[in-house]
Amino acid sequence: MRIVLVGPPGAGKGTQAAFLAKNLSIPHISTGDLFRANISQGTDLGKQAKAYMDAGNLVPDEVTIGMAQDRMQQPDAENGFLLDGFPRNVSQAEALDEALKSDGQKLDAVLDLEVPEDEVVKRIAGRRICRNDSSHVFHVTYSAPKQEGVCDVCGGELYQREDDKEETVRKRLDVYHRETEPIIDHYKAQGLVVTISALGKVDEVTQRAMAALERENA
């Protein structure tokens, strides 16, 4: 299956992408991984991306599209893939359509993870990270530390990242609504969108997504 995963920040796309890719035996292709791999390997596209990033500029669509297209042509993606974080806007979606068409392929589904905006803010703004080890993550509501502001694992100070503050989260949501959300209508016109609720436990959302994808491709 060839799937695009969409949803607002805080919808759990990365977590769901990993589980779904494993269940479907297809590679999980995220924009972040694409950039890191190309930059670390010193590819031409990686060098171009790094030059833009080092200058504090956004990487142009054509560079991101080039990386994605190259990754989708790798042997492990022969039977499908799950794209996470790409396409990010309608122009990238159109370029993806053309790239797949030129290879005689097409998308099977666009999985839209739906989460109420207030829940997104609650999920992200409630996160607290340990200053000693960023892998120690807590949440004021869902996984609170035994002692407020103190890491259960190492006793380090817990803090809220700037990116996780409510004002920043709402700005990120505005960007999502303005730039990324329109791709849902783009794919609805092709009859590809499958919308599910991303509320609930991780495994419940995964089961919901798998069932919806199976119905879509029955």
Image: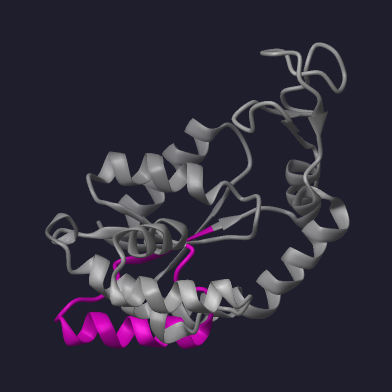
Tell me if I can see residue 87 in this picture: no
Q: Locate the C terminus by quadrant.
A: bottom left
Q: Is residue 207 left or right of residue 112?
A: left
Q: Is residue 96 left or right of residue 61?
A: left
Please state the total of marks drawn on the protein image: 0
Percent of width and height locating residue 31? 44, 63
Query: At 87% from the left edge and 19% from the top edge, which residue is drawn?
Result: 148
Q: Is residue 209 left or right of residue 199?
A: left
Percent of width and height locating residue 88? 52, 74
Q: Locate the N terminus by quadrant.
A: bottom left
Query: At 64% from the left edge and 27% from the top edge, which residue is drawn?
Result: 133
Query: At 30% from the left edge and 77% from the top edge, which residue is drawn?
Result: 44
Q: Quadrant of residue 191?
A: bottom left
Percent of width and height locating residue 193? 45, 68
Above or below residue 189? Residue 4 is above
Above or below residue 166? Residue 206 is above
Residue 15 in the magenta stretch? The answer is no
Q: Looking at the picture, tell me which residue is in the foreground, 217 or 15.
A: 15
Residue 97 in the magenta stretch? The answer is yes
Above or below residue 48? Residue 194 is above
Tell me if I can see residue 116 in this picture: yes
Q: Looking at the picture, tell me which residue is in the foreground, 216 or 97.
A: 97
Percent of width and height locating residue 87? 45, 73
Q: Quadrant of residue 41?
A: bottom left
Query: At 15% from the left edge and 58% from the top edge, which residue is drawn?
Result: 79
Above or below residue 95? Residue 204 is above
Q: Looking at the picture, tell me which residue is in the foreground, 6 or 128.
A: 128
Stretch in magenta? 85-112
